[in-house]
Amino acid sequence: MTVMEQRGVYRPTPPPAWQLRTDPAPLLPDAEPYRVLGTEAAGKADEELLGRLYAQLVLGRRYNTQATALTKQGRLAVYPSSTGQEACEVAAALVLQERDWLFPSYRDTLAAVARGLDPVQALTLLRGDWHTGYDPREHRIAPLCTPLATQLPHAVGLAHAARLKGDDVVALAMVGDGGTSEGDFHEALNFAAVWQAPVVFLVQNNGFAISVPLDKQTAAPSLAHKAVGYGMPGRLVDGNDAAAVHEVLSDAVSRARAGGGPTLVEAVTYRMEAHTNADDATRYRGDTEVEAWRAHDPILLLERELTERGLLDEDRRRAARDDAEAMAADLRERMNQDPELNPMDLFSHVYAEQTTQLREQAAQLRAELEASDADDADDADGEENAR
Ligand SMILES: Cc1ncc(C[n+]2csc(CCOP(=O)(O)OP(=O)(O)O)c2C)c(N)n1
Ligand SMILES: [Mg+2]
């Protein structure tokens, strides 16, 4: 006899009257991406902020072209360019306070630089070095994250922990459209909403996950709509409109800081370059699409607005360009110096306490290096004697 068949043992109770626990309407994103530049809302935008955004976008574009050039010169192993996405990168950095944390993906070196990180340090990982190149705690920038979406649960954990400790910290985590299909995206958003963690998720929907277009990635009405399923607001914004992205992210950060919980922001933008220097985008997309987005370039949109309002003259343009050239020259010069590498560093910082295997491997490498040093010394002696 099963439990179900024992009379009086199992009495199913009727379920409580079911009702929605949250009104979904206020969580829904706008039907169209929110815009500021070229609209009436631009009149209210702070002039000083627009000027700062402009200078940073020009600098950011130059940083992208310089880093891409460094891959061709063999000075960088790989560079996932954010050309076309500078408005998102710069706004993400500018909306944070020093005490906040940024959790970037591999494409977001520019956000790290706009937050004040040394451009050379920001490129260390992409140069093929074994470490991040900077101290994440000092800069409050998590390591550039290559495994898709794994930075999101980290951001939620950090933000939740800060809240438990009573620290006034907001975490802003950046992820691509492709990253939203990862399990970590789901887990991070669910925990963030249940805990009401002070975290902002910025999805840069740049149209592609390498060669996979968005319509093969998701059947959701928009990526911002995914927020509703977790019980947090979703905001849809024009990712090439620096003023709009800045406003939407600022609102989300303020909300998180005030205890209002997480927000998912989808910034609609476009990846103008190939996925990385190792990719050929002409294999999966046409020129017409790329050209259409070129007309909606983030720098162009802001220049148009500033010019119409009489805020951008030739002197200001030149000043922005000169600053960008100086940054690029410095980056070139410093990236052209070979870093001093010690192969034994491979074993540092892997574990707090070295494992037996790693100790053995380290001893093996040390012996090989010493043998090779001894060979070099013999060769040098041989050359000396031959003279
Ligand atoms: C967990 C994981 N799976 C697969 C990859 C390989 N991969 C690297 S980039 C990428 C596409 C990601 O696209 P998206 O999230 O839209 O970011 P974007 O490159 O467009 O900025 C993939 C699949 C990875 N890095 N990590
Ligand atoms: Mg993408």
Image: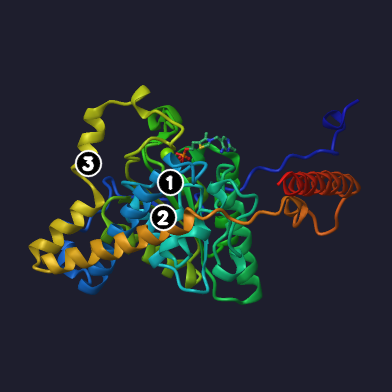
Compute the Cα span from label 2 to label 1: 8 Å
Q: Is residue 212 visible?
A: yes
Q: What residue is disc 3 on? A: 294
Is 159 above or below relative to 240?
A: below
The CB of the residue at mark 1 lies under 8 Å from ligand 1: no
Question: Crowding at label 1, few (<14), some or many (≥20) Cα neighbours within 10 Å?
Answer: many
Label 3 amino acid?
Answer: Arg
Count of numbered tags: 3
Relative horizontal placement of residue 14, taking residue 268 as reference (left or right): right
Mark 1 residue element? helix
Q: Quadrant of residue 148?
A: top right
Label 2 amino acid?
Answer: Arg
Is 100 above or below relative to 286?
A: below
Residue 197: x and y in percent read 56, 63
* Lower position in the chain sequence, tag 2 or tag 3: 3
Label 1 amino acid?
Answer: Leu
Query: Which residue is located at x 91 percent, y 25 percent?
Result: 1
Mark 2 residue element? helix
Residue 243: x and y in percent read 26, 61
The outermost residue toward the top is: 283
Compute the Cα span from label 1 to label 3: 23 Å
Circles 2, 1 touching at the beta carbon (< 8 Å): yes
Query: Which residue is located at x 34 percent, y 60 percent?
Result: 248
Q: What residue is disc 1 on? A: 70
Question: Crowding at label 3, few (<14), some or many (≥20) Cα neighbours within 10 Å?
Answer: some
* Lower position in the chain sequence, tag 2 or tag 1: 1
Please name which of the two marks, 2 or 3, marks the residue nearer to the observer. 2
Q: What residue is disc 2 on? A: 332
Please name which of the two marks, 1 or 3, marks the residue nearer to the observer. 1
